[in-house]
Image: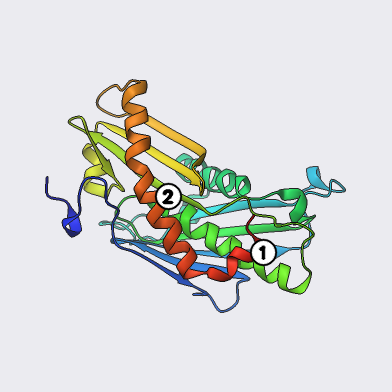
Amino acid sequence: MVRDYNRGSTAIRPVELQMGYNAWAEGSCLISMGMTRVLVTATVEDKVPPFLRNSGRGWVSAEYGMLPRATHERTHREATRGRQQGRTVEIQRLIGRALRASLDLKVLGERSILLDCDVLQADGGTRTAAITAGFLALLQAVSRIHAKTPFADKPFRGWLAALSIGLEQGEPLLDLNYEEDSRIGVDLNLVMLSGGKLVEIQGTAEHSLFDRQLLERLLDAAEPGFATLFQRQQEAFPEGQAVIA
């Protein structure tokens, strides 16, 4: 099977992580996964939503959007439609859940961090790329807080990344591009912490059903890709280890 970048079935696309891409945000990361490019910025606020006031816990949330020409054909900005599409809402909730899972929100304290995830160019895996880059933007923002006022404990539970994996004619395909994603029989989005702890599995039988054995096979096939992403994250922002347990 010939794939883009002459990669094997369980290899990820070339990945580049550029920290501090935005000069004004407390944290930022531009990720390139093949032709997919997502910019994530982190904004820190010294307040929390009403349901968390006086709880001693912090909050992390995300907003997600695609530029009009992120895809082959121009799409209308959702602001011109007057509302977000269901896909957008679902993706930003996933990103928020994933990033909150990487943190001990009580150690973070009563402050909020908002991640803005903007897809500059899409070729599959935009939500997973947003999570991988979003973690680094969040890590940079929290590291800056720690540099000014050190936390009593390390707030992060580990490094966090996300990847897509699919099943085509019985064979796993890791880190799907758009063309692969559009034809794949089974499609999973995986979120994982370093150390092998799973945060979320989104699985869909697009054109064929799958059983537990196939699910476990897909999870096993994704592990080397996650190991590569964790290594790239640590190379991109080694300072982050100071706040990771």
- Is 55 displayed left or right of 107 in the figure? right
* N-term mark: 2 or 1: 2
Query: At x 68% / y 71%, what residue is drawn?
Result: 144
Horizontally, residue 182 falls left or right of residue 103, namely left
Q: Secondary structure at mark 1?
A: helix
Residue drawn at point x = 19 percent, y = 59 percent: 5
Q: Which residue is mark 1?
A: 142
Helix, strand or loop status at disc 2: helix
Q: Is residue 54 above or below residue 203?
A: below
Tell me residue 154's x, y (percent): 70, 57
Which quadrant: the C terminus?
Answer: bottom right
Residue 186 appearing in the image: yes
Other residues around mark 2 within 10 Å, as few (<14) / some (14–19) / many (≥20)? many
Q: Amino acid at mark 2?
A: Thr
Residue 79 x/y as whole percent:
50, 55
Residue 58 vs 94, above or below: the answer is below
Badge 1: how crowded within 10 Å, few (<14), some, or many (20+)? many
Camera-side residue of 41 and 67: 41
The amino acid type found where label 1 is placed reads Val
For disc 2, the marked residue is 128
